[in-house]
Image (spheres, coloured by chain):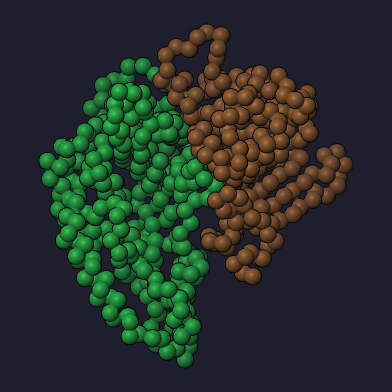
């Protein structure tokens, strides 16, 4: 259960959402899209087109080769101690077999969309609630959604209930803007919502459904609107993976020269720890994203070296703030260069 | 015997302690009732196998009674009408936690050898998310303690989540109250300085020497690193990466 906190204007999180769905189509998984904001058909029309393997791999290969040849001659004169550290790769330059790449400027062709089974749930088009399940004091919008998901799972056999079906497939569920006022839940508007447990109960049952069947789910939530932090804590406990997107639009960081290459930060609040004692510990947890014309990339946050003559003290606070973000090993190179006053 | 152990985690995931206690008690031959609210049976089973215990075998032999919260919840909501007289243990979703307590009492009632039974709960904070009032949760724990610790001379181990600057008042209320009642608290915390690859966190062991007399609690602090099959503990600042 991947839980995404939306950025303020929802631009980047909807992009991430579309990537998830597009990946599902390309992999041949079935999709289930639910939304109360936009009609799911519209969402599906705007999925990015997958890039054909050959052309992109060649592009990547060229870039990587160019980078490698330049750096080879550089040997460090001043900070020679850092010579032995491995070159920090900001983005994956080698083509890995995991996942596909997408071109954001092009839309996915309708034929490709139709190649998998799509299920949609648009809250405002659903029939009034027939209680086939006990509501359990949950918001009716959520209850309808759960019932719909459960029906699809059992009908299509994702939970292994149909032993005849040889080919197992995976259901990718995407739910957009959960918890917003459009679902009938006022958890985003008021400090003391009427029914604070609807959202958490919904997540618990959804978690049960996901565990019982072959499905994966991404949910986006406008977390910046939720004032009751207690709910966010409980929701974090109930999800497997929690990722927050913070975009720089409209905030003071947009003009901060430290962040000029990026459009926002990715905060990884929680990573899944399933079926083992340990979880995937990568080197660093500071990630930033950037939206180029053709793709959205997520990279390690890499501070540019501070090459100004006057090491301005004013920006020290900013650095201190971002130093909190930086964990060991990531910014060592950049900050090291900054503090050498020669 | 007759001890109440509280597992507490802040800013990190303390579930490795739950896995440890589960395999520890099963290997010791005690009868265990495991109320697993957050993860599925297969998750615990796979980890337990790495630790050398087979949950499926223990379940078949009757040594382990496993309540899988996620599955029971689905059965309750989407299933057909259940037979009368066999209320599901999660019936509390409409009233209080009495049904859950009855389930625990019935499963641990019949003894298993000479060793006391064990109740293991993972995790208690989820009950608050599901609509139980904090007082109901505390009552439930109290009843369990009386039944398991005092009457059956068994042990109770409970996991809760908490944060130091948490705004979840109900959760904090439950956690603080349980802290005062526990004999042993194992508190897994994330490092104050942030994420680190070699030291996953710090564990504080607080042992109540006596609940009646005003003696100081014994506090020990270690840091730990979790690996695939076990967890290594070391004194603060002496992780293998540093030495």
The residue shown at (25%, 52%) is: A100
Q: Is residue A337 left or right of residue A50?
A: right
When asked about the image quadrant of residue A96, the answer is bottom left
Report x, y in % for residue B230: 61, 50
Query: Which residue is found at the position 25% from the left and 44% from the top?
Result: A27
Residue B6 in view, yes or no: yes
- Looking at the image, is A286 positioned above or below residue B100? below
Q: Position of residue B184 (x, y in %)?
A: 74, 43
Of B222 and A336, nearer the camera is B222
Q: Tell me, what hue is chain B?
A: brown
Decide which of A22, A335 is in the foreground and name it: A22
Residue B62's spot in the image, x, y percent? Answer: 63, 23
What residue occupies the far top of the structure in this picture? B84
For residue A252, side relative to residue B26 (left or right): left
Horizontally, residue B44 falls left or right of residue A163, namely: right
Q: Give the colour chain A carries in the figure.
A: green
Q: Position of residue A10 (x, y in %)?
A: 30, 49
The image quarter in which residue A29 lies: top left
Tally the numbered discs.
0
Which residue corresponds to the image point at 40% horizontal and 41% vertical from the top-left?
Answer: A1
Can I make out residue A146 in this image?
no
**Quarter assignment of residue A25:** top left
In this view, B189 is above or below A58 = above
Please name the residue shown 73% across and 33% down the image. Answer: B155
């Amino acid at each position: 259960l991947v839980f995404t906190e939306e950025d303020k204007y929802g631009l980047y999180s909807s992009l991430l959402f579309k990537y998830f769905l597009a990946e599902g189509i390309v992999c041949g998984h079935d999709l289930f899209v639910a939304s109360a904001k936009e009609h799911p058909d519209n969402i599906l029309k705007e999925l990015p087109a997958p890039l054909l393997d050959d052309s992109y791999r060649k592009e990547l290969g060229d870039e990587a080769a160019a980078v490698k040849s330049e750096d080879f001659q550089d040997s460090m004169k001043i900070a020679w101690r850092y010579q032995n550290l491995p070159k920090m790769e900001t983005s994956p330059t080698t083509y890995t077999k995991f996942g596909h790449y997408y071109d954001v400027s092009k839309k996915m062709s309708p034929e490709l969309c139709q190649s998998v089974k799509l299920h949609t749930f648009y809250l405002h088009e659903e029939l009034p609630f027939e209680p086939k399940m006990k509501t359990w004091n949950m918001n009716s919008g959520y209850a309808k959604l759960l019932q719909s998901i459960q029906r699809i799972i059992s009908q299509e056999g994702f939970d292994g209930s149909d032993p005849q079906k040889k080919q197992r497939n995976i259901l990718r569920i995407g739910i957009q803007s959960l918890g917003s006022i459009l679902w009938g839940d006022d958890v985003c508007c008021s400090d003391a919502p009427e029914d604070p447990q609807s959202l958490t109960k919904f997540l618990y049952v959804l978690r049960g459904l996901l565990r019982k069947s072959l499905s994966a789910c991404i949910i986006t939530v406008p977390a910046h609107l939720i004032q009751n932090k207690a709910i966010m804590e409980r929701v974090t406990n109930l999800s497997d993976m929690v990722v927050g997107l913070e975009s720089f639009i409209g905030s003071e960081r947009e003009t901060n020269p430290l962040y000029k290459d990026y459009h926002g930060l990715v905060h990884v609040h929680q990573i899944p720890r399933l079926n083992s004692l340990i979880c995937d510990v990568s080197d660093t947890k500071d990630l930033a994203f950037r939206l180029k014309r053709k793709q959205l990339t997520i990279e390690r946050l890499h501070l540019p070296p501070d090459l100004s003559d006057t090491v301005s003290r004013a920006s020290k606070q900013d650095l201190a703030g971002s130093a909190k973000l930086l964990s060991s090993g990531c910014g060592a190179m950049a900050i090291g260069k900054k503090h050498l006053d020669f | 015997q007759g001890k109440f152990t509280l597992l507490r985690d802040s800013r990190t995931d303390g579930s490795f302690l739950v896995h440890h206690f589960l395999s520890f008690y099963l290997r010791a031959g005690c009868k265990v009732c495991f109320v697993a609210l957050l993860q599925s049976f297969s998750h615990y089973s796979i980890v337990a196998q790495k630790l050398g215990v087979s949950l499926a075998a223990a379940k078949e032999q009757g040594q382990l009674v496993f309540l899988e919260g996620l599955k029971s919840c689905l059965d309750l909501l989407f299933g057909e009408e259940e037979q009368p007289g066999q209320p599901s243990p999660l019936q509390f979703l409409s009233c209080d936690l009495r049904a859950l307590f009855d389930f625990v009492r019935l499963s641990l009632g019949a003894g298993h050898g000479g060793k006391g039974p064990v109740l293991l709960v993972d995790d208690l904070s989820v009950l608050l998310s599901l609509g139980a009032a904090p007082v109901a949760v505390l009552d439930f724990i109290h009843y369990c303690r009386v039944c398991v610790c005092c009457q059956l001379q068994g042990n109770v181990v409970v996991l809760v989540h908490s944060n130091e600057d948490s705004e979840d008042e109900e959760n904090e209320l439950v956690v603080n109250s349980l802290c005062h009642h526990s004999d042993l608290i194992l508190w897994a915390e994330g490092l104050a300085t942030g994420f680190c690859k070699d030291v996953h966190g710090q564990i504080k062991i607080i042992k109540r020497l006596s609940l009646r007399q005003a003696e100081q609690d014994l506090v020990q602090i270690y840091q730990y690193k979790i690996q695939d099959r076990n967890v290594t503990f070391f004194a603060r600042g002496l992780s293998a990466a540093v030495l």
